Image (cartoon, grey):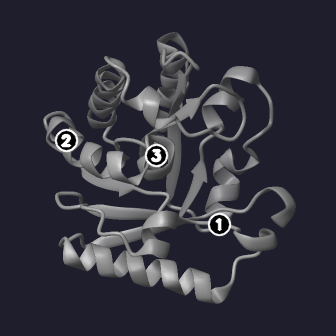
Amino acid sequence: RGVWMPALAFEILSGRDVQPMSDVEILRRDGVNIVGLAVQAAVGEDGSIDVEKFHMYLQAIKKAMSNYHREGFEVFLTLEVNYGGKGEPVPVPREIVEKEGFIEQYNSLVLELAKVAEEYNVEVFAPTLEPDYYLGGVEFAAKWCQEILPKVREYYKGKLMVRLAFQEIALKQIDFNIQGYDILGICIYPFEDTKVSRERVKLFIDEALKLASKYGVSSITTEFGVWGGAL
């Protein structure tokens, strides 16, 4: 029973109260037993990655992980990529992802985070957040997820999640290869007119279970996101 807190590093570094669910007593009251945390990789319009910012966020998240473990919570950790802006992440365009040297530098951050996940005994790790949406689109992400998998396995020995946005995959019934991962993670959030229908939720979960079964992935987990007008 988890809660997703991608803004926690920003909150820690800025002192702004943007992630109020981070209080351990609130989490216990609500029955939470695992927290989802992210380190951001900010990508400029020229394809450069703000490595300094990555390491600032990483230091903040290291402290947070130690605190949550000390308080008896498990931890899910991932890398959140954000292109050319602030606030809600923006997808990295395909032409940037395929720019010479970009993915190699990006992979080096993924593997650095994998080492940290192992060092801090993180229970669940995803190489990146929603690569099918944020990292070059479904076709590129499907290839990348398989290429990064054995590299991550060299450093991280815990449960590996492939953490997908899943919208295009579910709606078009795309066969996205998730073989080798332990957990399939998907995202369900408001679509038309800031509403989520029961039919849409059922469709996404059914498609996720079908995909997981095909590739022998034993578990699925979902983010149920609500923001903007839906609030």
Task: Tell which circle, 1 or 3, labels the residue nearer the N-terminal end.
Answer: 3
Q: Nearer the viewer, residue 173 or 4?
A: 173
Residue at horizontal 50 percent and vertical 84 percent from the top: 203
Q: Residues within 10 Å of mark 1 (few under 14, many from 20)?
A: some
Q: Residues within 10 Å of mark 2 (few under 14, many from 20)?
A: few
Q: Nearer the viewer, residue 133 or 72?
A: 133
- Could you give the CA–CA distance between mark 1 and mark 3, rounded to whole angstroms? 15 Å
Q: Nearer the viewer, residue 182 or 167?
A: 167
Residue 37 placement (x, y as % from top left) = 52, 43
- Could you give the CA–CA distance between mark 1 and mark 2, rounded to whole angstroms? 28 Å
Relative to 195, is 19 above or below? above
Kind of residue sitting beneath label 2: Glu
Identify residue for label 3.
129
Residue 143 placement (x, y as % from top left) = 25, 47
Identify residue for label 2.
147
Kind of residue sitting beneath label 1: Tyr
Identify residue for label 1.
189
Q: Tell me: 194 left or right of 91.
A: right
Mark carried by residue 199? none
- Could you give the CA–CA distance between mark 3 and mark 2, rounded to whole angstroms? 16 Å
Task: Tell which circle, 3 or 2, labels the residue nearer the N-terminal end.
Answer: 3
Q: Tell me: 27 left or right of 175.
A: right
Residue at horizontal 50 percent and vertical 58 percent from the top: 165
Task: Tell which circle, 1 or 2, labels the residue nearer the N-terminal end.
Answer: 2
Residue 47 placement (x, y as % from top left) = 49, 19
